[in-house]
Image (cartoon, coloured by chain):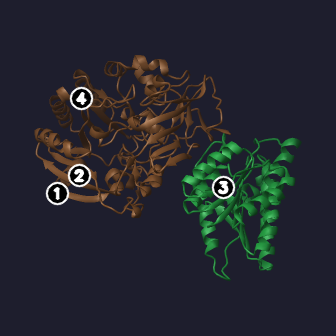
Chain colours: A brown, B green
Amino acid sequence: MTAHHSASNYESWGHYPKATHRAVVTPSFRSVSITLDKGLSWLPRGNGRSYGDVCLNPDNGLISSSGLQRLISFDPESGILHAESGVLLSEIIDLVVPVGWFLPVTPGTMFVTLGGAIANDVHGKNHHTHGTFGKWVRSIDIVRADSGTVVCSLSQNEGLFRATIGGLGLTGFIVAAEIQLERIESPFMLVREKPFQGIDEFWDLDEAMRKDYPYTVAWIDCLDKNGRGIYTAARSCHSPGVGSMLNAGAPKSINFPVAPPFSLVNGWSLRLFNKAYYATHSRKQGECMTSLMKYHYPLDGIKNWNRMYGPKGFLQYQCVVPSKDSRFAISELLRKIRQSGQGSFLAVLKTFGDEISTGMLSFPMPGATLALDFPFKGASTTRLLDNLDAIVSAVGGRIYPAKDARMSAGTFLATYPQMTDFTKYIEPGFSSGFWRRVSQ
Amino acid sequence: MRRVLVVGATSAMAQETAKILAGEGSRFFLVGRDKTKLTDIAADLVLRGGKVDEPYAINIANLNGHLDMVERAFEAMGGVDVLIVAHGTNPDLGWQSWEVATETIMVNGVSAVSVAAAVADRFVKQGHGLILLISSVAGDRGKQSNYTYCAAKALVSRYAEGLRHRLIKMKSGVRVVDIKPGLTDTPLTAGLKKGLLWVGPATIATGIVGIIHRYENLKVGQYLPGTVYLPSFWRFVMLVIRHIPDKLFIKTNL
């Protein structure tokens, strides 16, 4: 059975840009063939947690994976899981953590679908030791109009496999995938926080910490002229007692029921937040134990946190700059942001590992990545981000499509030269708001 | 372990309900039209903690197959504790031809009653059991847009109402609940414009599981209502709709 839903409100997580869709098709079983209206272009859609327009297909159609939420098989010995593409990472976690497994790579929210995690080739705080999500994908079942369901992997249809990982849903409709999970000995993490006074100190700290800790990330106060911040490193806690894992502190859930009429994120609240965050976190020393869930998904405890930016929404900005120019480029970026007076609660800085991703269009590269969000204030915001783009492309870096809503076609082509190769794997009739923006 | 017979197991509401029940460690006998789909669902339920017997494929409009199907379910699981009747079709809105009218009444109305009657016989002998019939708010008033569907669901609701009364008077230990979901975003309602009142099948499923829990913890002499609207605000919406005077009602496009 294939459901043809009338297109109600399908937004992106950043509430920007706004889009309306003409049709939404929701296949309810993976064995069922789909018929798509030839007059429209189509884009697979997961849970809509990407920030910009990779999950939007304005004035065209969406193929929702919300009818494909079944687990297919799981081997608790080998940790190999086969599941349909609409299954949320949170469901996988519920299933596997009690028996001592976890996602080898996880983004900062568990409310993304398996298909979405693959299509955006998401990464986490352990990129320097574990690479991207795509590295742990053993095979993908993908539906294409000309050939039906195709299974692809590194040993079978390798080109399609590499194009589909990080392929933004454009290479066909992912219906299922097989992934390798990672053993954990407890549902707890040991976390170490260390304040640093300025960005130079960050680099030395990072150099030392990333050798000892698989998870590293830093928060930067982008209003401070030295770029002070808090460095957080974490590792899995090797305590016994896997049996009592399940309820180890799933975050309590609170909700932003409606969007306030204006953004709660402004100059005043930012300064206040950053001061308070620095003050509370710089006091902690040594390793603290925390639950796996609280460590990985702090924001999942606040439902619809994106609403705090008000009706205009917000822009996420995440870029990576290559290792050799990291220090210079990151300082430049932070300087530009500070000068603009715009910025976010959390500017996040992390160094990636040296591994090259499986995915053709994957975002991570050896270097440093900076992520921030900006309340959308119109032209002044886009102008600032264009300036940041210029710095990023000048040093050979790139922007993360999953978080982007505004980079120019010129910037995309210059920073993702692989796009020319990628184009031949695009399923005819598939497109997205993002793709039309960056390819025309 | 709770033993659940699910008729119409491939329906979105049934699937979501079964997922939750599987997590609580239930055993299932799944009935539907398509064996492949039932097998997909069975694999999922097993991984979520359920136990699932060999799925049973049947065209539910074929009433003659019902007794055999019910017998197989009781045999396979050594009895049944909960019956969920969730199958259904939703014809296109508008004029309902003879073919559409008879098929709609047969599949959504008569066949649901048939399954419930077959299971009720056995539940009475067994001395316990919970019959959950998923009807619809549509059964509360006949309306021009989908009147055969309304009629079929009304048949199910009236049957559930009377059967429940009978089983209570008999002190049979068997319970019946008529579940009336409101507008729900499922494959059956594809193509309809979705507004504020719509909810997803997972919301309905949470409500259904709540009913099962309440009945499982029922104390002797305790009263529980036999009709449950899901979500509950539909009780008030339908109260209003039922009381719109005919003279006005026939002018609406409902």
Query: Are dots 2 and 4 on a single chain?
Result: yes
**What percent of the width, then of the height, locates residue A38?**
63, 23
Q: Which residue is mark 3?
A: B182
The CA span between labels 2 and 4 is 27 Å
Q: Which residue is mark 4?
A: A321
Q: Nearer the viewer, mark 1 or mark 2?
A: 1
The residue closer to the viewer here, B240 or B192, is: B192
Q: Secondary structure at mark 4?
A: strand
The CA span between labels 3 and 1 is 54 Å
Query: Are dots 1 and 2 on a single chain?
Result: yes
Chain under numbered label 2: A
The CA span between labels 3 and 4 is 52 Å
Chain under numbered label 3: B
Q: On the rendered structure, is A428 left or right of A109? A: right
The kind of residue tagged 1 is: Gly
The kind of residue tagged 4 is: Val
The CA span between labels 3 and 2 is 44 Å
| Res. A221 visible in picture | no
Dot 4: within a 10 Å radius of its alpha carbon, few (fewer than 14), some, or many (20 or more) residues?
many
Q: Secondary structure at mark 1?
A: loop
Q: Which residue is mark 2?
A: A273
The kind of residue tagged 3 is: Gly
Q: Nearer the viewer, mark 1 or mark 4?
A: 1
- First in residue order: circle 2 vs circle 4: 2
- First in residue order: circle 1 vs circle 4: 1
Q: Nearer the viewer, mark 2 or mark 4?
A: 4
